Amino acid sequence: MTCRVAFEIQELPDVIRVILLLFLSKDKPTSKAAIKRRLDRVCSSLACVNISELDKALKEMSIEGLITESDNGVLLTEQGYKLGKEWKSLLLKKEPVLEVVAGLVDGSTTGLVVVLSAAISFLTGNVALFSANSLIFAAFLTLTAVAITNFSSFFLGGITGDLADILTLQNLMNYSLSDIPDKAERDKSLMLVKKLFLILDKEIHRSNFYAATICGVTTFIAGSIPIVAYIMLPNPFNLIISLTVVAVISGIFLVRYRSRKTRVHWKITLLETLAIVVIATIASLLLNLI
């Protein structure tokens, strides 16, 4: 059965529906009693949502094709699962596209700069700068600094930006729910939204920590691979392999990941990525020469 799924947050069942999409699964059935306990934990009150209000929300979700009900419990349909993922991405920021992209770009650019600096030092006869110990120390010190900087900036900046977005979304929901004619239902809806966003506040901190960790780790790994290849392999294969690794990370994996997540054609993403990497590399090399 195909139906239109409207998602204006205008009444109490809409709020309940959002909570259920965040917490239900498409693989493991959840009993109605467990759903009721979940709602009670959200609103911290046994009188927050009664069973008739829950039944109404479940019935609407079933009609819209978002869930299936059976004796074993409630399951999300494929459509409900996809919609739930969108809400998790919006409310919990569980799609760290920017963090992965930044980690791959910064890491591969750092590795590229280190490799090219070492190669230029070797070609110009500056053997002191090209010694293995100094190269390893300088390379991984630089890479670690970039990874830590990425972690801290994305963690602190991400929390600030996400909380501002969440506050705006909460205000919009409150404004929409304030039009409910029945005072009891209106107060209950506003209280449930307030409690939900208090929980989301904690989840956002956790989600941003994971995203920042992903960014830092991705930065370090993306930069380490070409550097290790350059140090371990003999000349001139080390330079060729290192540049190939950077090209694969930046030109293939990164482009494919960005184009798939942002739904932009890969040719446009490829040109943008190449421009960013080239500009960043030239700027870093010029700064190293000063």
Image (cartoon, rainbow, N blue to C red):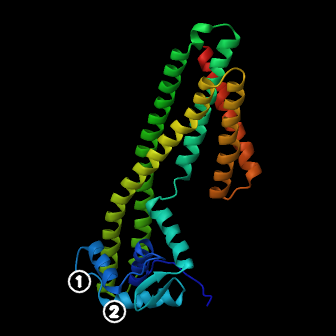
- Residue drawn at point x = 44 percent, y = 40 percent: 151
Quadrant that contains the N terminus: bottom right
> Is 41 left or right of 161, judged from the image as shown?
left
| Residue denoted by label 2 | 52
Relative image position of residue 260 (x, y in whole percent): 66, 57
Q: Nearer the viewer, residue 187 or 245?
A: 245
Relative image position of residue 106 (x, y in whole percent): 57, 36
> Is 44 left or right of 119, judged from the image as shown?
left
> Is 108 left or right of 18, judged from the image as shown?
right
- Residue drawn at point x = 55 percent, y = 47 percent: 100
Q: Nearer the viewer, residue 59 or 27?
A: 27
Three-letter code for the amino acid on which mark 1 is drawn: Ala
Sooner in the amino-acid sequence: mark 1 or mark 2:
1
Whole-number angstrom distance, CA of label 1 to CA of label 2: 12 Å
Mark number, residue 47: 1
Q: Mark 2 packing: few (<14 Cα in 10 Å), some, or many (20+)?
A: few
Relative image position of residue 18 (x, y in whole percent): 43, 75
Under circle 2, the secondary element is: helix
Three-letter code for the amino acid on which mark 2 is drawn: Ser
Relative image position of residue 92 (x, y in whole percent): 44, 61
